[in-house]
Image (cartoon, rainbow, N blue to C red):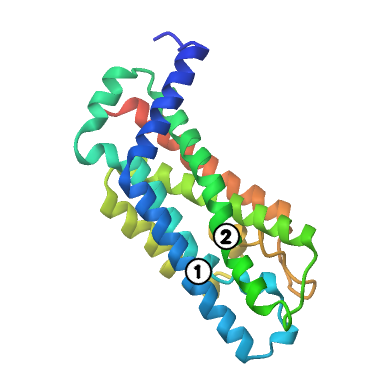
Amino acid sequence: MSVPSSRKITQILRAELDKLVTLSLTWLTLMGTFILNLLLAAAFTSVGLQGAAGTQSILNIGLSSMGYLQAGFIILGILAACSEYTGGQIRTTLTTIPWRGFQLSTKYLALAIITVPMAFIIAASGVLYTFIMMRDTAVVIEIDTMIEALVGATGYLTLTTLLSAAIGALLRRTTPALVILLGYYFIVSPLSRDFLPSIKNYFPDTAGSYMYMPPSSDKINALTVMQGTGITMLWTVIFITVAIVFYRKRDA
C-alpha cells in the first residue's frame, strides 16, 4: 500500500483532531479533572495552612494532587483509543483511511496536541491556587523552578495519556483498559514499591514523578529529571509501537 502524501497526512490529523474535539467525553473528562484538581489543591493547601506551612514549598503543595490527577488523563487516553470501537465507527475510519499505521500515529499526535495545553492549565491551576492562599506563609520558589516543574508535570501527564491510549488500542475495550490501568497506578504500583524497592524507579509512574518533583539530595537511588523523563518516554514509545504493530495486523 502506498504511503500517503503530506496533504493526506494533514487531512488525517485534522480528522483525528475533529473526532477528539467533538467527543463530548473528552471535555467532560477534562472538566471533571480540572474541578477535582482544584478541590484537591484546596484540601492540601488547607492542611498546609494548619500545619508547619513555613517549612513547606508552594510547589510541593500545589503539585501534591498529581498522584490523583493522573487518573483523569488515564481515562482521557483510554476514551480516545476505545471510543470508536464502542459503536463500530472504527470500520468507517479504516475504510476511509486505509493507512493504519499513519492513522493511529496521527491519533496519538492529535491526542498530544489536545493534552499538552490542558495538562499545563490543570497542573498550573493547583499551583496558582496554593500560591494565592499561601504566599505569605509558605516558602516561595523562583519562577524558573516553578516553570520547570510545570513543564515536567505537563510532560508526565501527556506521556501518561499516550501510554494509556496505546494500552486502550491494544485492548480495544474501555472497561478492561480502565480496570488494568487504574489498578496498576493506584494499587499494584504503590504496593510493589515496598516489595520491589530496587526496581521501583523504573516503573513509568514512579520514574515520571521525578519529571516534576526532583528528589532532594538525601534520597538514595533517586533519579534525575532527565532520567525520569527518559524512562517514562521509553515505556510510552514501547507501548505505542506495540499498539501500532497489532493495529496493522488485526481485523477491525
Checking the image for residue 119, the label placed there is none
What residue sits 57% from the left and 60% below the top? 123
Task: Give the spatial CA distance, label 2 vs label 1.
Answer: 9 Å
Secondary element at tag 2: helix
Q: Give the residue at mark 1.
A: 38
Residue 208 position, x and y percent, is 60, 57
Q: Which quarter of the rendered picture does the C terminus lie within? A: top left
Crowdedness near tag 2: few (<14), some (14–19) or many (≥20) residues, C-alpha within 10 Å = many
Given residues 167 and 18, the one toward you in this image is 18
Given residues 35 and 232, the one toward you in this image is 35
What residue sits 58% from the left and 72% below the top? 64
Q: Is residue 235 in view from this perspective?
A: no
Q: Is residue 81 in view from this perspective?
A: yes
Q: Is residue 57 left or right of residue 37?
A: right
- Quarter residue 199 falls in: bottom right
Q: Is residue 122 left or right of residue 98?
A: right
Residue type at mark 2? Ala
